Amino acid sequence: MKLFFFLHHKCGSGWFNKINFDLFKAYGRVVHILNENDSNYNSVNDFYEKKKAGFVSFNNADLSFINSNDNFKAIHIVRDPRDIIISAYFSHKKVHPIMDSVEGKAMLEHRKKLHCLNIEEGIKEEILFTKKWYLDKLCTLSNYSSNNILRLKLEDISKDHINSYRRILNFFSLKITDDKQFDRLSDLYYKARVPLEKRGLIKSSKFRNQISNICFEKIMKKNSWENITKGRPKGKLDINSHYRKGVPGDWKNYFNEDIHDMFLKHFGNILDVLDYK
């Protein structure tokens, strides 16, 4: 079974990729990141197979690159689009890295423009930029329904990322055991297999289907908000950090009637689709 994460810009993709690299490595799965629709591949499934991946994070996930007939399970992360706009505004204006790409060049010009506008006009400009480059893809994928895809909200995961990831692993049919000897015995078992696999005496066992609870909790603690922000509590603003504030609903501090009307004009019923009333 192929395992995917479908991620979107300003929906915690950096945080999820940090967790996923550590977590799925523990399950013996090599994590590869697919950035949008790479022309070298026909689909996310094609990317998975050619990379011989164990897990794929699909950044800026696009429905046109997903084949519903493939044998996969995926987590689709969404966020209140109004918070995406505000997060993108502050990030694009100052801290987001500029990549050497068509998107990067567009973002550089966008950043220059934001510095010439007041905050209200800047947020309106951000609505247009983010819609074109990012949010249209989130809207399209969010309108697609499949039993293979579990849609989760960033807001819910950030409240309790430990139990949220237990739910994610359960959806992926990956187990966590309370056996305190599991880590030691598992490492010995897989180390013993390597020379036998190389000699072709036994079939390669690429993936593990369980890890210990101790291992799981270490990974969750390592990637907690407190650790990645070096002790800064959620809600305390740091405009120079990629993890700026860490609380939902910040859009309420910036959306006035004009901005709200413009948002609805460009995004229609997306709040209903994503269940953000």
Image (cartoon, rainbow, N blue to C red):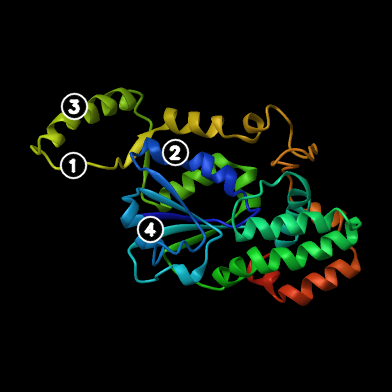
| Residue 126 or residue 140, whichever sits in front | 126
Residue 204 numbered mark, or none: 1
For marks 1 and 2, give the one nearer the viewer.
1
Q: Which residue is labeled 3 in the image?
A: 192
Please say whether residue 277 is visible from this viewpoint. no
Residue 193: x, y in percent? 18, 31
Q: In whole angstroms, how far apart are the C-alphas of marks 2 and 3?
A: 22 Å
**What amino acid is found at the position of numbered circle 1 in the picture?**
Ser
Q: Which residue is labeled 2 in the image?
A: 23
Q: Residue at x 74, y 74 (%)?
A: 266
Considering the numbered disc 4 on the image, is that residue within a helix, a strand or a loop? helix
For marks 4 and 2, give the one nearer the viewer.
4
Tell me which label, 1 or 2, sits earlier in the chain.
2
Considering the numbered disc 3 on the image, is that residue within a helix, a strand or a loop? helix
For marks 1 and 4, give the one nearer the viewer.
4
Number of disc labels: 4
Tell me which label, 4 or 3, sits earlier in the chain.
4
Q: Would you call the spot at circle 3 few (<14 residues within 10 Å), some (14-19), or many (20 or more)?
A: few
Q: In whole angstroms, how far apart are the C-alphas of marks 1 and 4?
A: 21 Å
Residue 47 numbered mark, or none: 4
Considering the numbered disc 1 on the image, is that residue within a helix, a strand or a loop? loop
